[in-house]
Image: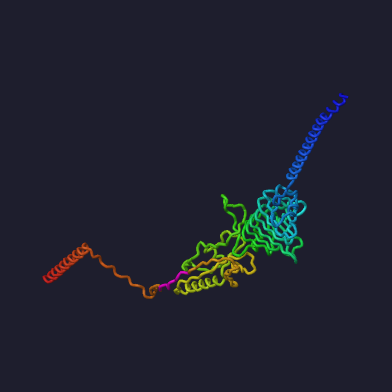
Amino acid sequence: MRSHEKRVNVCPRTQGKYLVSVVLTAVFAIASLFGTLLFSADAVADAAESQAVAQVGNATYASVQEAIGHTSMKNATVTLLTDVAESVTITPLKGMRNVTFDLNGHVLQADGSAVITVPANMQLTITGPGTVAGGTQPAVDCRGALHVKSGTFTSDATLMRFAETDGTSAQGSFSDGTFIAPTLFNLLDDAKNLGYVTVRGGEYRGMIPAGLNTLALLSGSFSDSSNLAPYLADSLGLIPDGTSGDGTGDGMFHIGDLAISSKQASVELDPVDGLQRLSADDLLKLTETQLNGIADYLLVVDSDQLQALNDQIDRTMQSMEKRKAFETVSQNITITAVRNGADDVIDANASGGAGPQLRTSDHDGISAQVTVTIKAVAEPEEPEGPGKPSDPEKPEKPEMPRSGSAVQALAIISLLLVIASAICAYATVHLRSSRMHN
């Protein structure tokens, strides 16, 4: 009986120890499991972070297109986090019209179509260093509005395509950046016109085709100047680069202000040296007038003023032939820079200065003035007439020398003559006396 009671008293203690051990084991297991879950969650988060290619605000996304879809009025900038091959369309949330794309030093490459497509009624601004590489595709297809502030854009085909259709009109503005492609700008396939595209800066290595009537070039540098003249604003031209050490430059043409210079802004013609009528080319060479290295423009001489100068030259030559006096006259002539190939340009050089009047006007660009002066001619004096052939001049008797020795010689000769006369007289008297005695 006592033994049984003892066993009953010991059993509860043993069970308590086992219970504590079990509880501790369970707590440890739960803690270990929780730690594993936390580690796994962090690993998943890190993996997701490493796969993010774009960011909007503090949120990151696995694709640029997804990031564009999460822009908002508060966070409208999509920042590229890594190089990625993805063709995207600017389609933000409903109500959003403006999206800014920051290249952030990375490359966005085409994947089957244009790298970036801007639909109608959407506006995209591209900033930051980085590259949009089209490969065989365009870098941008735009039916909406595109503003490029920086970046490098490349393509092996057409770089940028725009469209103006019956319902929409694209707009483009380029303030800086580098643009490299065989063809820089052109129309989308269904477009009637380009839209309104303005270049305000940047470097453009490629050709711009003719016929893009709503393209305006205000600034920038270009490798191909073949079709640029119609796109330049008034009073603007292309200046070849010549800043390198050997004077050859980098082959680029920079947009700048037109400037006309004349090394001989005032010249003087001397009729004594001979005169002839001047053509427009003659006048440009005579005054050494030229544009400051600017291409796609030509210099046009005012045809009326050149004709007036030639009239003065004609009158001067007539006066010289008639041996009449001619007073000094001067003629001012305006020389204007006009776009090469413009419809209203008359090539005065080909017509020798004659032709319709072409006055300076605002749309003609700039002009300079030179002055040509014809020196006065005095009436020549009448020359002395030659002697008459029937009345030859009689030779004058030479005058005797007036020296002292000549006078002495005359005195001696006179004395001898007197002596000779005396001798003759004596001989004559003596001869007569002899005859009388006989």
Q: Residue farthest to the right?
A: 1
The majority secondary structure of the magenta stretch comes to loop
Q: Nearer the viewer, residue 208 or 135?
A: 135
Say above or below: 437 vs 175.
Answer: below
Going 35% across and 72% down the picture, which residue do you hit? 393
Image location of residue 329, percent across then percent down: 47, 71
Q: Is residue 211 visible?
A: no
In the figure, is residue 344 to the left or right of 320? Answer: right
Q: Is residue 383 visible?
A: yes
Q: Nearer the viewer, residue 168 or 334?
A: 168
In the figure, is residue 336 to the left or right of 16? Answer: left
Q: Is residue 379 magenta?
A: yes
Q: How is the image coloured?
A: rainbow
In the figure, is residue 271 to the left or right of 142? Answer: left
Q: Nearer the viewer, residue 61 or 346?
A: 61
Residue 357 occupies which quadrant of the picture? bottom right
Q: Nearer the viewer, residue 148 or 205?
A: 148
Image location of residue 382, percent across then percent down: 40, 74
- Quadrant of image for the N terminus: top right
Q: Residue farthest to the left?
A: 437
- Quadrant of image for the C terminus: bottom left
Q: Is residue 55 magenta?
A: no
Image location of residue 71, percent across then percent down: 72, 55
Image location of residue 61, percent across then percent down: 74, 49
What span is in magenta?
Answer: 374-381
Going 64% across and 61% down the picture, which residue do you hit? 217
Residue 188 occupies which quadrant of the picture? bottom right
Q: How many marks?
A: 0
